Image: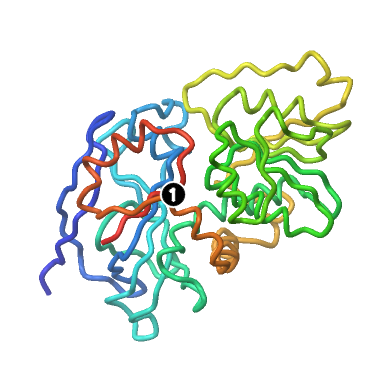
Amino acid sequence: MPATPAQAFWTLAPGHGAIREEALPAPAAGELQIRTRYSGISRGSEALVFNGRVPSSEYQRMRAPFQAGDFPGPVKYGYASVGEVERGPDEWLGRRVFCLHPHQDRYVVPAEAVVALPESLPAGRAVLGANMETAVNGLWDAAPGPGDRIAVIGAGVVGALIAFLCARIPGTRVELIDIDPARAELARALDVPFRTPGEATGEADRIFHVSGNPAGLRRGLELAGFEATVIEMSWYGEQAVEVPLGEAFHARRLTLRSSQVGSVAASHRARWSHHRRLSLALELLADPRLDALIEAESAFSDLPDLMPRLAATRGALCHRLRY
């Protein structure tokens, strides 16, 4: 059987990308051929990759599951693909699946690399699967509980998802905090209270920092109550970050803790696999209010011209690609 042609987006050099054609081999036993319907652009990490800002020390840890090439480029990168199985075992044919795969119109992967979408989840919303998985891991690292006062700094996709989940814990007081007052509309859509940094209440028990801006981390430390925990979920690439560990940091006995999705949180690692965690994330996307996190949609073929603009914009929501 002849090879199937496929098209994939590559970052060729910092700030420059193109769609390249490649030939897919026929699926082997235990493999699936996926036809992509949508993919989502993860603005934080993908902007760093596209702009060539991945530190050399992180070249291996930053690799995506089906990445091709190496940093700084040429490299094929991404991890939010939703499609349908068009070749493989009969029990998989026609099923809608999520895969941590770069932006590509068709691809072949092992069956264990995909997660079937819940029947209630529209394919277009499922592109948020990797973001929701990051949010779930952040909650596991922070361990918020009933009645906690929770501040989420940064109303991007991951921050909004964290606030959305935390607000559903009984008795919590959650504030989604952002420097852009226009994000109040997003917070209303998610039924979460919104505050600008100057309006935030303070004395929080759990603070999630997801803004990607060191000023947000500094504000998070200011909002922390006695013996509170600050969860740092931003990744800065090569940027050096100054953190005020003087002032009240020691007197308040604060905990500053990192959270990163590459490893399942220690609290759940003995019982949860990456596959099980991703399955949970997809289930949690069933709420139609989360469509508010899809900011815009473009054709996959537009990505070479679109990506430079997206990579230059901080704090934006999910941009979805259709195939």
Q: In the drawing, does residue 321 fall left or right of residue 258?
A: left
The residue at the far top in this view is 246
What is the quadrant of residue 175 in the picture?
top right
Residue found 55% across the figure and 61% down from its top: 278
Residue 116 x %, y %: 46, 73
Q: How is the image coloured?
A: rainbow
Residue found 59% across the figure and 42% down from its top: 260
Q: Name the amino acid, label 1.
A: Cys
Residue 313 x %, y %: 40, 33
Q: Which of 103 and 161 lies nearest the eye of the viewer?
A: 161
Q: Total marks drawn?
A: 1
Query: Label 1: which residue?
Result: 318
Q: In the drawing, does residue 205 fall left or right of residue 295?
A: right
Quarter of the image for the C terminus: give it.
Answer: bottom left
Residue found 39% across the figure and 40% down from its top: 46
The residue at the far bottom in this view is 90
Q: Which of 202 and 181 lies nearest the eye of the viewer?
A: 181
Residue found 43% across the figure and 65% down from its top: 98
- Secondary structure under the numbered disc 1 in the rendered image: strand
